[in-house]
């Protein structure tokens, strides 16, 4: 049953020709460019040296260091392609919210009305998302729902796990 659903989703995806954007700020794009530059100039050269050194050890069929260095090169090149694609498909956004509204780079204290617990979240772009440190993407269900709301607003969050309400308790800028 799951395979049929997956196949249907793939067909619908092709038919709709959905464009996927990465919502990024200019600052996030610059960070990505810096990482690409580092990977191309520094890391690529280091990995090439590792491959040359491992190749010099002899028989390549049983040379673990050679295989590991080649795998590392593949990972690096894959990451470069991924970052370049993120920049190419980026939709540049600017935070046009007021100081009283939830926006990019702001920390928001939310009261989950079902649990009556308060938790702080920082709203960031996709690249900067870090769930362990409560940095949520503006594209996440929670981030999208609370964006541009003010202190005191009760907001309905539509998530895959079910709908719930949060109240915005406090907004602070970095």
Image (spheres, rainbow, N blue to C red):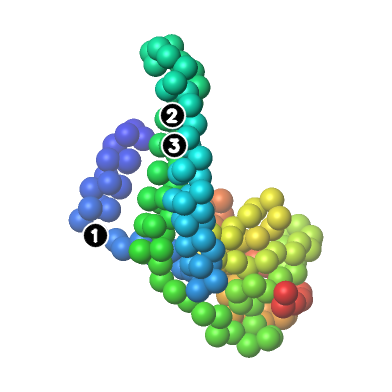
- The reply to whether discs 2 and 1 touch (Cβ–Cβ < 8 Å) is no
Query: Residue at the spot x=55%, y=71% of the render?
Result: 27
Q: Is residue 34 visible?
A: yes
The percent position of residue 3, horizontal first and vertical second, equals 32, 34
SS at circle 3: helix
The percent position of residue 91, horizontal first and vertical second, equals 41, 71
Decide if residue 4 is on the left or right side of residue 140: left
Residue 101 lies in quadrant? bottom right
Closer to the eye: label 3 or 1:
3
The percent position of residue 78, horizontal first and vertical second, equals 40, 44
Residue 168 lies in quadrant? bottom right
Depicted 107 relative to depicted 43: above or below: below
Instruction: Tell me, for residue 48, which label it has, or none.
Output: 3
Closer to the eye: label 2 or 1:
2
- From the viewer's side, name the closer residue of 80 and 167: 80
- From the viewer's side, name the closer residue of 137 and 70: 70
Residue 31 lies in quadrant? bottom right
Label 3 – label 2 distance at C-alpha:
6 Å
Q: Residues within 10 Å of mark 2 (few under 14, many from 20)?
A: few
SS at circle 2: helix
Label 2 – label 1 distance at C-alpha:
47 Å
Residue bearing the label numbered 1 = 16
Instruction: Tell me, for residue 52, which label it has, or none.
Output: 2
Query: Residue at the spot x=44%, y=29% of the render?
Result: 52
The percent position of residue 18, horizontal first and vertical second, equals 29, 61
Query: Residue at the spot x=27%, y=53% of the render?
Result: 13
- The reply to whether discs 3 and 2 touch (Cβ–Cβ < 8 Å) is yes
- From the viewer's side, name the closer residue of 86 and 8: 86
């Amino acid at each position: 049953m799951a395979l049929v659903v997956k196949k249907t989703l793939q067909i619908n995806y092709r038919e709709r020709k959905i464009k996927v954007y990465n919502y990024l700020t200019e600052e996030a794009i610059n960070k990505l460019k810096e990482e690409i530059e580092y990977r191309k100039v520094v890391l690529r050269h280091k990995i090439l040296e590792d491959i040359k050194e491992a190749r010099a050890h002899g028989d390549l069929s049983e040379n673990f260091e050679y295989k590991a260095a080649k795998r590392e090169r593949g990972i690096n090149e894959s990451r470069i392609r991924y970052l370049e694609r993120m920049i190419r498909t980026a939709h540049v956004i600017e935070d046009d919210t007021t100081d009283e509204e939830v926006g990019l780079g702001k920390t928001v204290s939310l009261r989950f009305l079902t649990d009556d617990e308060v938790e702080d979240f920082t709203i960031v772009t996709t690249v900067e998302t870090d769930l362990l440190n409560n940095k949520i993407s503006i594209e996440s269900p929670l981030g999208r729902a609370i964006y541009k709301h003010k202190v005191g607003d009760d907001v309905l969050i539509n998530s895959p796990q079910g709908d719930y309400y949060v109240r915005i308790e406090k907004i602070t800028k970095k």
